[in-house]
Image (spheres, coloured by chain):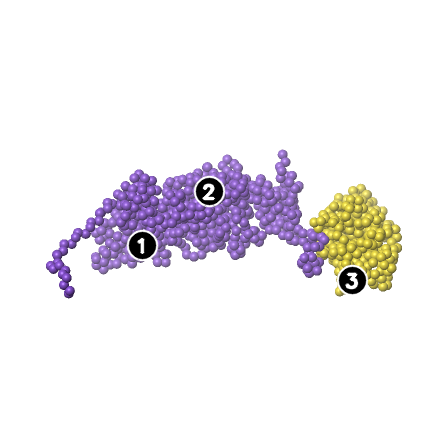
Chain colours: A yellow, B purple
Amino acid sequence: MTVSGSWVEAVVAAGAVPASHVPDASLGRDDLDECTGADPIEDPDLRVHPLDDAPPLAPGAVCFLDGIEQWRVIGYGGITPIVRAHAAAAIRRRGPDRRLRTVAEATEDVAITRLDRLPDAVRRALEAAAVRVLEFPAEDSASPALALAAARLEVQKVRAVLERRLAEQRLRALAAAEWLVVDGVLSDSAALSDHPRALGVVKSHGARYFEGAELERALTLSDGHRTSVFRPKGRGARHDIYSWYVRLWPWEGNDLLYGLLRLEARAHPDTLALAAQIAAWVRAERAPIATPDRRWDRLLYPIHDVETYLRARAPSDLTSHLASRIPQPAPRSPRTAA
Amino acid sequence: MIERRHLAPPIGRVVATEQKPATPHQFHFWTANETTIGIGAIVRVAEGRGTGEGGRVVYGVVTDGFAYSDLATPLHDVVGAEGNPARAAESPTVRQEIRLWTAAVLRQTPEEPLQPVPLGEVHVASDVDVAQALRMDTYLGGAQPTAIPVGLYTSGGLEAPVYVDADFLLGPEAAHLNISGVSGLATKTSAVEFVLASIFQHFPPHKGRVAAVCFNVKGPDLCFLDRPGALQEEDRRRYERLAVEPEPFQRVRYYAPFKADGVNLNTLRTHPDLVGDVEPLVWGLREVLDYAEVLLNRDDIDAKADAFIDFLADRVVDKEFEDGFGGEHRVVTFADLERLFRSIFDGLELASRGGDSWRTHHIATMRKVRNRLANISTRCKGLVTDDGPSNDLPWGRFEDRTVYVVDVANVDPLGQDLVFARVVSQLRERLERRDLGVDAVVVFVDELNKYAPADGPETYVKKMLLDISERGRYLGLVLFGAEQFRSQVHRRVVGNAGTVVFGRMDADELATPGYQVLSPAIKIKLATLPIGELMVRHPHFTQPIFVRFPRPAVLRGRDGVERYPPAADLPFEDAVARQLVKLDRRVRPNQVKDVIADRREEDVRRALAHTRQARPQDALAYFKRLLGGRVAAVPAAARESVAPLNPISDEPY
């Protein structure tokens, strides 16, 4: 299958062996392992609070931010993969009419490889191409498996940068009563961490902040309940935020993480005061259901909508096709290794 | 110069998937949820940025529409709303949804090579686009345009006149118009009235003269075509847009037979202010005998009877004829014919020749024909006269842009068949001979279900309608037929109609095979069409088009009856007087009553008919002369009597 983009054709013409491989991991992103530990803020220890009496916060306008990343190996120079990657982020705003409209968007296409492991002609072609080239560490170029894992990290970084940049731009344009909901953590950005109306919605739970009974309380949280607010610890250079869990759907019959979200907001007493209302608001966002996404139990529909929007606009040749694994005609260019 | 349409933003975009590809005949496009287009809208697709410059331009008509959201299964909506429908509307975000439309291709430019529709921008069609899409450009312009406006295409705030091609509506390329629709919505008749008005005003001069013959077969539908009807401002605007003057027909001639009394007209146009315009339609033996086949039951009239009827028509009627028994006859009327029959039967009986044949015709055949013919004048009394002169349409003197209304609404079905068959046959014959007075005639027949049913016996009327449908276009004899159920009309009659119009349709009718080519959405639209909107099929249109037409500028039948209530039947003397006054305004009714007092009604009717035919200057004098001098009643002479011998005495016994 031919991939679009003049630089791809250029490197293939320069001798790279064309390839068409979409690694499974490129269809989604893995949770980054996070350190554990938390300081109690609301209660002396992690406790469970019902949301029955909490009126949901109902902001008149909300911006939702999400990003995607897609990549594929478009060729090999020897055994060094040359990856074409696409990252995009968008913000869609929901106004009083309850419909989502795009207010900001950013995309970037990059090439990821290890230049010094490529044949000279291929390297020169890539350097001359109108595409930003990112290199994974030299130690990861020893084997294709390591190289692909490293390339994946590079793609994630590109996406994260796009998201952060877009979010910070939007914060400056945010109206008085308008909120920004981010798919993921706030603590990567100082601006986001400090903003009174920025909310991070984390649906992956790779990081553990509690142990023992507190962990059990967090993971067995009943539907319609939230935990007390805590401050995650041990997050390296990340910024200070408050966090709490909320359960969107009853988990019984499924698994512990079913319908479980962790929210992040500014580390401020106002957040403490609004924790219940924000939790009730997020729980109200469970409808409409974000199907057909498999993560619909934790995926807010507006975030799903942003992702759908981005995928609809992404290059179509970066997704895997049924026919992508059929044998391809032999290339005309010589298979010369570095 | 950049046209406005090039600057208008697109309203949609063509999409094609493996499951729903774009083809040379169909494509799919999406629009914003809030859009002005709907089923029947005409759109333009152009390659590039919508201008189509240097590329392909495709015109299509929307035939179906779909709306759906990203909901994977209805169950998820239930779950999201926790089983409470009211909560579904409270969700913070409205689901993404789509308006996806299917359009049928109307035209592609260039037309060759024919290719799939490009995946380009979709624009609402402008006036120019509509003309292009419907191929109207081929007959709207040029040295001899043949465009006849039939309605306004309206969609998304745009309104464009739709024209049909006179060469394909009135011949010779194609012809005939068929209109279907449920009864009671005043759509079929109104549409025909409007189209006729449009034809009269836009019939191309190079095509000659045109007239219309309308059979009024029910109620007062066509009885007030010369009277202005109430129009709303919207109607006037539509007339202006279509360049048709909103006025009633300038020249209308009404014909109606008499009632059984022979003097009161059998029509609802009997209001004193209007009845003067109605000409009686009276036919005699000659007119009937030519179309005896219409009236005689095919089951009992065989070849022998046919031969005898032909013999009468060819050798007897209007000729000096010797019956073979010494009798001389000149058969002009039914009464004359009856005298001939009596003479023949008496002659056969008295001659005692032992034979039962007369001039090779068996007596039984003759008796049968005699009975049937006698029956005609009884069943169609008022239309068929026993012994008076006939009064017919002005054959050979048809006038340009004139409507001839033949009111047979209250006539016996047999009489309707006779009127229909004779009038249409005369039209055909005279158009063939080019001596009708006009070059083309539109014949409007309602209730085709009845006259040309899909099944049932092969009647003369049905055969004639088939003949018009299949060959009329060469003669300029054009059938405008209307019916409630198209599926129940003979397929060759509807199939030969070049232009087909649909009003609101019955759902059962739409379920019949004839409508399979229509999409479910078109069918739904047809089933709910408002008054004044129609779907039109025309040879130049590759797909049916919805149009709106203004209500006709003539008085509707129901309104006409209210404004001009029919007069009650007049007594015989008054009815005769009124007819003579109509012929000569100097006639005083009392004079007429004196003249006809004590006279036999048959004699009066005969004299009146002759007077009407002759149209003398002094109608009363002519009438009196025909009626003959009155023989004064002579008082009975006093019988001579013999005086009693003895006067009555006072004796007690």
- The residue pinned by badge 3 equals A222
Amino acid at pointer 3: Ser
Q: Secondary structure at mark 3?
A: loop
Pick whichever, B595 or B40, lies toward us. Answer: B595
Q: Identify residue type, mark 2.
A: Pro
In the figure, is residue B135 to the left or right of A285? left
Q: Could you tell me if residue A51 is visible in this image?
A: yes
Q: What's the chain of the residue with tag 2?
A: B
x then y, percent, for residue A182: 78, 51
Rendered-image quadrant of the C terminus of chain B: bottom left
Residue found at the very far left of the displayed protein: B645
The image shows residue B159 at horizontal and vertical percentages of 57, 42
- Seen as rendered, the residue at the extreme top is B1
Cα separation, mark 2 vs mark 1, equals 43 Å
Q: Nearer the viewer, mark 2 or mark 1?
A: 2
Image coordinates of residue A315 in percent, x first then y, are 73, 48
Looking at the rendered structure, the kind of residue marked 1 is: Ala
Q: Which residue is mark 2?
A: B228
Query: Which element type, helix, strand or loop, lies under badge 1?
Result: helix
Write down the chain letter for disc 1.
B
